[in-house]
Image: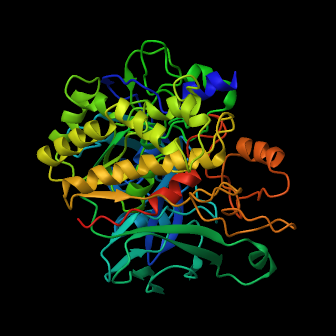
Amino acid sequence: MLKRAAIACALCLLALPAAASAAMPGVEVGKVRLAPAQGGRVTLLVPVRYPTEMLGRAVHARVRVAVPGAKPRTYRLGTRAGAGAPRVPERRKRFTFVHAITLNKRLSAMVRAGAAPRAAVLGIARLDVDRDGRPEQVRRRLRRLRAVPRAGSRQCETLPQMHARPGRRVAVKLPRCGSDLRWTGRSKGVPGQVRIRRGRVVYRAPKRFRGTVAIRLAGSAKAAGRASKRRQPVSRVLEVKVGTAQRTVVRAMGDSVTAGFGYYDNGQTMPLSQLFSCEPGEKFYNDACSSNSASRSNKGTTIEYAPDYGLSNNVSWAAQWSNEHGITDYKNLAVTGSEPVNWLKGGYLYKTARQIEGEDPDYVLMTMGANPLLSEMLFGVDNMGCAIWSDIFGEYRKCIEKAFAGVDLRANLKALYEDLLANTTATIFLMQYHLSVPSSAIAYSATQVAEMSSLLNGEIASVAAGLGSQRLRVVAPPHFDVGVDISPVYPSDYSCSRFGFKVDGPSVQSSLTQDELTLTHPLSFCKGPPSGPPWVISGDTGIHPSATGYTQMASKLPAPTG
């Protein structure tokens, strides 16, 4: 059973033409609330629940306000949606963004004098992935004209996501709330300077910094007394994307390591019990159970991508890198199971490759080359018997290199790289493969698995170097510690054993693999990770990275320059 499961979820062999993306959830409009006057002006707080696909994108709402004795007025609201510090992965289906409307002096005076305002809200979510002005999806929800009650003391507007250039300053008004609060900024660990001045939070980014900054604000009641002191401060987060990549176009392609196999498009992990329904079908592989796919079953015969191609769930290394730098023109068109030949002329995904080239990306991100070798090397005992019985100092390398030649690995990678170089002006990041030791790879030692990974990564780097293009940039992921001795493939200079056995470091492998290594290496195995969850998921028997592992991989990519 484990063997069949591992073969099924290992980077598989085929791929399919792409279909239209799935529908994103709708919009929910909450109750409008009345905040007290500040500086003579009255504020309305307008909560709208948007689908998570709108995170970091422009969100819109129209609010019609009617005050007795005055002509109704419509306010148009638009801002870049923020929802606090980024989550890895993002598992929410929706997030609430509280817009704020400040009424003019006349209407404010009428409300302060006792006039009871009413409001109607139309919340709109327009998902325009490639910013061509033609939204792929539009979702809206209307709340009819209703009375506006007073806001609670802890109800506040949401801060928008902001963008700043390195070395420059950005400022935004402090949140308007149901009570008058005193705000302080928590700048510990935040690169740059954070100040609160004249009703605004001001942030200046370091000159050489690029990435995401989350500034935590705490609002406490100004009124004296025991009750106000006992209250926990109201917390809000200002998210700032520092860099110049807002208009950058990113396209991702490749296999399951780019697609984020083992995660659904809502950020939830695939349980081991669902592996057989997620494994590629007998005739078609439809990218099921991957972070960029809306499919949760292998029964489909077309690829149904997630509405935003997995950007908002923040799982894959491609999505996490793009989110870190505020990139929203993003499509992850990778397909779990695809191999280089599928993306070349005559292959299942050739049209998808041409689509990517035609969309003039600034960056192309990919992992490619492990298929079909990974399943053959790890689980094809009959075909790879020579490797199983070989010592890594002897015939092992020759056996693996023969397997590379048998699937034309170098030729197919070279053809694919050349095609992308000829038909785009993009910088192409070639992410090498992480080291994972599946619990089901019982025919091989951890050292042999590590050597396979090393040789495959060497082929990727060698082919790229042979083309001599500065636009082809090989990216090495960090070492995924196994927790046992895998020398000479990787140094073993760490020990957590009272007997002094040396290993590569505290294990970051899947929980399933660590349980097995505990039994097979009882005296030397070093359990981990030192902090956080494992870097590899267990739902596929320990092959693909977890969201935490993808974070480690994304951290190795340089920041975009445009």
216 to 300, vertically: above or below:
below
Location of residue 221 with respect to 315 vertically, above or below: below
* Residue 387 in picture, x, y percent from top left: 55, 36
- Residue 540 spot, x, y in % from top left: 62, 34
Residue that appears at 71% across and 57% down: 483
Give the quarter of the figure containing the C terminus. bottom left
Query: Which residue is the extreme one toward the right?
Result: 498
- In the picture, residue 480 is in which quadrant? bottom right
**Figure quadrant of the N terminus:** top right
Q: Is residue 84 above or below residue 290?
A: below
| Image coordinates for residue 441, horizontal then vertical, percent | 65, 35
Left of 32 or right of it: where is 204? left
Left or right of 316, for residue 139: left
Question: Where does residue 517 sit, x and y in percent of width and height?
Answer: 76, 47
User: Which of the pair 554/247 is nearer the observer?
Assistant: 554
Q: Nearer the viewer, residue 438 or 222?
A: 438
The outermost residue toward the left is 422
Q: Is residue 501 left or right of residue 312?
A: right
